[in-house]
């Protein structure tokens, strides 16, 4: 929390204040996300999850229709779009005013979600690497863009990830990508270190230890560590048993400058934010 800058982003003409950390609830309309508790396939399950995020006072919803867990099967753009059409319809019925980000690396999917389905933000795990039209597309759409660090693809990213100098390479990655986006006229950029994406256990904790380095870019930071392998592998437990570890790392992330927590457990994350604000 210390040193958190007074960020705000433009969401459909309204400024969303990020000077206090926000909680983003995860909604996966997929059959194979790594955490079974987050998989919502039926209309009733999707509706129930959206209502839960709203009732637990989440400020945003992140909708994903392509599982990006290590080794996940590829999903066609057509299937991703069909899942998102079904999911976004319910999201907008249940939470018409809540800012919604869509987790996709495909520019045509991003365009459809913004122009047709009422999404507000694009959350791209690939940083534009998997679709070279993504940067021009989001800049033209004029919507906030979550820029994440990853190497490879979801199918290959955990096959012996290597860095000669992790911190230097990650900072250079963001510096180059931010400049590319700015050159295209992109205004609102949110950074995401991509915990668990093309990183070993040691890489993840080295990045968390130095997370505040990203404040050099003067952009808001999204952190997504919820129930990930960097927790359950270290603690020798399952994703179902990783809530306590998630809470600990979310606390550290907030202390090191996170503006948005992307989580499965909204109520608990809101409590973490409230307690950390009381220490600020």
Image: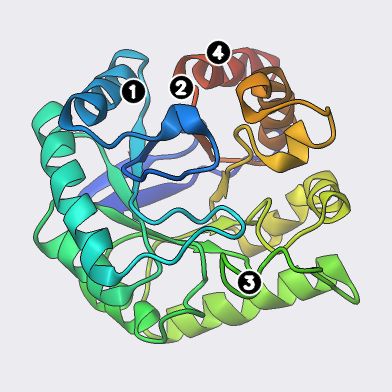
Which corner quadrant holds the C terminus? top right
Earlier sequence position, callout 1 versus callout 4: 1
Could you tell me if the residues under marks 1 and 2 are in contact, i.e. CB atoms within 8 Å?
Answer: yes
Color theme of the render? rainbow
Quadrant for residue 95, please give it: top left
Q: Nearer the viewer, mark 1 or mark 3?
A: 1
Which element carries disc 1, helix, strand or loop? helix
Earlier sequence position, callout 3 versus callout 4: 3
Density class for disc 4 (Cα within 10 Å; few <14, some 14-19, many ≥20) is few
Separation of residues labelled 1 and 4 (CA atoms)? 14 Å
Q: Which mark is residue 53?
A: 1
Q: Which mark is residue 174?
A: 3
Which element carries disc 3, helix, strand or loop? helix
Separation of residues labelled 3 and 4 (CA atoms)? 31 Å
Task: Please give the residue where the numbered disc 4 appears in the rendered image.
Answer: 271
Density class for disc 1 (Cα within 10 Å; few <14, some 14-19, many ≥20) is many
Q: Is residue 6 left or right of residue 161?
A: left
Does 274 appear above or below 64? above
Q: Position of residue 174 (x, y in %)?
A: 63, 72
Earlier sequence position, callout 2 versus callout 3: 3
Task: Please give the residue where the numbered disc 2 appears in the rendered image.
Answer: 266
């Amino acid at each position: 929390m210390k040193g958190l800058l007074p960020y705000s982003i433009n969401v459909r003409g309204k400024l969303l204040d990020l000077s206090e950390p926000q909680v983003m609830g995860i909604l996966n309309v997929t059959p194979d996300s790594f955490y079974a508790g987050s998989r919502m396939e039926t209309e009733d399950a999707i509706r129930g999850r959206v209502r839960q995020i709203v009732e637990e006072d989440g400020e945003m919803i992140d909708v994903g229709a392509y599982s990006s867990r290590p080794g996940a099967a590829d999903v066609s753009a057509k299937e991703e779009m069909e899942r998102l059409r079904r999911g976004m319809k319910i999201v907008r019925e249940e939470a018409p005013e809540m800012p919604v980000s869509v987790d996709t690396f495909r520019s045509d999917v991003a365009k459809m979600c913004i122009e047709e389905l009422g999404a507000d933000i694009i959350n791209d795990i690939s940083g534009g690497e998997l679709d070279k039209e993504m940067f021009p597309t989001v800049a033209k759409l004029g919507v906030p863009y979550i820029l994440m660090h990853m190497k490879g693809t979801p199918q290959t990213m955990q096959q012996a990830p290597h860095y000669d100098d992790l911190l230097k390479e990650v900072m250079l990655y963001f510096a180059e990508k931010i400049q590319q986006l700015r050159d295209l006229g992109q205004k609102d950029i949110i950074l995401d270190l991509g915990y668990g994406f093309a990183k070993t256990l040691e890489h993840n904790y080295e990045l968390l230890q130095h997370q505040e380095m990203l404040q050099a870019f003067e952009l808001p930071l999204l952190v997504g560590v919820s129930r990930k392998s960097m927790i359950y592998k270290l603690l020798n437990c399952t994703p179902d048993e990783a809530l306590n570890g998630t809470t600990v790392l979310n606390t550290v992330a907030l202390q090191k400058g996170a503006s948005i927590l992307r989580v499965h457990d909204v109520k608990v994350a809101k409590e973490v934010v409230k307690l950390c604000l009381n220490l600020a």
